[in-house]
Image (cartoon, helix red, strand yellow):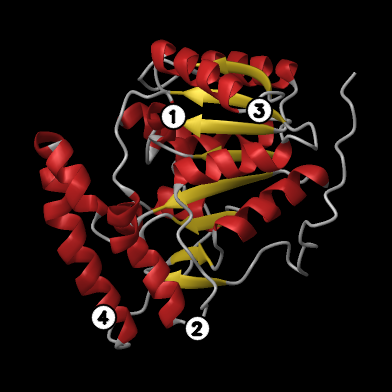
Amino acid sequence: MRKPLAVDDQADAPSGTGSPEWINLLGVRVSAVNLESATRRIVEAVRTRRKEYVCVRDAHGVIRCQKDAELRAAHNRAFLVTPDGMSLVWALKRAGHAGSGRVYGPDLMLAVIEAGLSAGIRHYLYGTTPEAIERLQARLLAKFPGIEIAGFHAPPFRALAAWEEAEIAEGINRSTPDIVWVGLGSPRQELWMARMRARLDASVLIGVGAAFDFHAGLKRQAPRIVQRSGFEWAFRLASEPRRLWRRYAVVVPGFLALTLLQRLGLRRFSIEQAMPAKTAAARAMDR
């Protein structure tokens, strides 16, 4: 039998809607949070047994949402859409949310794990490769003595059949985690969380992308000064030019142009939460 979670007296009480303030950034609901407040809200959601998921978002993901209604809906139904890129932080600050700050996926993962140690929060790791996830588990156990890792699974890198997803959901639920960390990369992880949320008993699902590989020691992160400058995209481009040059050739100018049009009132972007007629499973089979 699972032990009850300890109450964190320092956790923020939930607001009337259960969500923090947010801005409409190109039709995506971006939460006005920083690393500390996002961590508190996630731990509080676990403590009160809410059923939520969290998207960690950068400019590239916001641009992808422009042409993918399903992905946009997945973000707009999330408990939090945290500003992973500095361009999102600057947009929040321009809108008057001075306390907003970057919520970098790898940092959020470590902060939530550390904050949950005293509460006995149980974690499940889902994503990346078998080698990476085993290295990740070993490193987390070494870094956080007392951490409770309920289980882990590295799924095949392809669309899963309905019976496979059913087995995965059953396996995760048997492990009784409080938080499921999802490292599938975007947009797979956001679509997976939105699709699987109702089938999983865990309180919070959090998509953190490459955080698994970073914390497993398989990829190098940009220096802190580069992360805070807003030019982390340039560091990543220099590290993986063949894979990323097309992405940034479109994302950077596209994001700047669209946000300028929105700020000037020349183009409106509505917040859409309803799923399109085509189901996520059908969309996955098309990819």
**Residue beneath the point at 61% across and 71% down:** 21
Determine which residue is flagged by label 2. Answer: 96
Q: Is residue 238 above or below residue 95?
A: above
Residue 215 locus on image (x, y percent): 44, 29
Determine which residue is flagged by label 1. Answer: 215
Disc 4 marks a residue whose amino acid type is: Leu
Counting residues from the N terminus, which is met first, the one under dot 4 or under dot 1? 1
Total numbered labels = 4
- Left or right of 247? Residue 200 is right
**Residue beneath the point at 83% across and 47% down:** 48
**Residue beneath the point at 80% across and 62% down:** 13
Disc 2 marks a residue whose amino acid type is: Gly
Mark carried by residue 123: 3
Determine which residue is flagged by label 4. Answer: 261
CA–CA distance between discs 3 and 1?
A: 15 Å
CA–CA distance between discs 4 and 1?
A: 38 Å
CA–CA distance between discs 2 and 4?
A: 19 Å
Q: In what element is the residue under mark 4?
A: helix
Disc 1 marks a residue whose amino acid type is: His
Q: Is residue 107 above or below residue 133?
A: below
CA–CA distance between discs 4 and 3?
A: 42 Å
CA–CA distance between discs 1 and 2?
A: 34 Å
Residue 139 versus residue 112: which sits nearer the camera? 139
Residue 232 versus residue 194: which sits nearer the camera? 232
Residue 1 locus on image (x, y percent): 90, 18
